[in-house]
Image (spheres, rainbow, N blue to C red):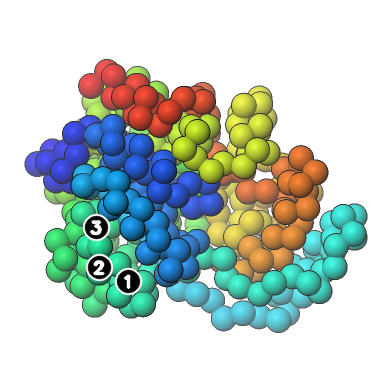
Amino acid sequence: MTLQRLLGIDLPIIQAPMAGVQVSPLALAVTGAGGLGSLPCATLSVDGMRAELAAMVAQTDKPFNVNFFCHAPPEPSPDREEIWRAALAPYYEEYGLDIDSIPAGPGRAPFTADVADALEEFKPAVISFHFGLPPAALLARVKAWGSKILSSATTIDEARWLEAHGVDAIIAQGFEAGGHRGMFLSDDLSEQVGTFALLPQLVREMKVPVIAAGGIADARGVASAMALGAAGVQVGTAYLLCPEATTSAVHRAALKDQTARYTALTNLFTGRPARGIVNRLMRDLGPISALAPPFPLATSALGPLRAKAESLGSSDFSPLWCGQNASGCKEIPAAELTYELAADL
């Protein structure tokens, strides 16, 4: 079965869900062009999610994807938090900020029964998960709505696990991809491989469709992935400069600068490895640091620093999520970019 038939779309192009840099307008634009627009919900409250879903269904009757994280929230550790705040204290002093004013809050929420309760009203055509899958009872609940289930695999073992647990398609997330790694069976970064190494291995073994993600930024990249057996592609970074994205001014500036060529996996901004453009914080502390508390507890302490720096035009403390190939970023409408990505199919 083709991806288009499975998901009810016209083009095998999925806009990657990108929490923090987009909400419904970008998803609607891609959906309107015949691709699969995605609504990231990991940073939304239940009421916020409901409002964005209402905006989606009010403006389209086409299928779209709703994305959630599936992490297990860690137990907060006062000792770890104290270590993290001590590492950030010099920056707080530099900006004249009160480190004791750091707000509490995890920054990212997993998929729960409360979220499912709110989501049931909408019964989206496609639901995707990052960091594995939710508990079996919750997964069975959303599948009972008729929703198609996607999830990311960064290794062949993760793909096998996802297929065994009933996903309808697997997103092969290569090492090049921007944002959070979807890894969930291991935290060993040495196991992570590139898109065009991972993709053919999964295509050869999986019975469900495989979607390529990571480093795909133009029509030639899309066609190459399809030639290797991908049923479709998921593209994120290329959409970051589209007017429908909520990408910040400092993030947009970094994407248009040569600095976008230099990305690294970092756990500093959330506590979990994610690829972004290298900035001051990553250079000072090292992109991967034991100082950062576990995901998603690193987020809160950086909030005031990020806000202050961005108000001064600086991206020193901002998570500049970006894949290894930003060459496809264009300041054009997302629908136009979607058509361009599919031009060689």
**Closer to the observer: label 3 or label 2?**
2
Disc sitting over residue 121 in the figure? 2
13 or 223: nearer the eye? 13
**Residue drawn at (85%, 68%) of the image:** 98
Q: Amino acid at mark 2?
A: Glu
From the top left corner, tell me how far across and down residue 329 is, in percent.
Answer: 50, 27
Rendered view: 34 above or below 100: above
Observer able to see residue 8: yes
Q: Work out whether mark 3 precedes mark 1 in sequence or the reverse, and give the earlier one.
A: 1
Q: Amino acid at mark 3?
A: Pro
**Residue drawn at (37%, 64%) of the image:** 50
Observer able to see residue 156: no
Q: In the image, is 316 to the left or to the right of 254?
A: right
Image quarter of residue 100: bottom right
Give me the C-alpha separation between circle 3 and circle 2. 9 Å
| Kind of element beneath mark 1 | helix
Disc sitting over residue 124 in the figure? 3
Give me the C-alpha separation between circle 3 and circle 1. 11 Å
Rendered view: 309 above or below 195: below
293 or 343: nearer the eye? 343
Disc sitting over residue 118 in the figure? 1
Callout 1: 10 Å neighbours few (<14), some, many (20+)? some
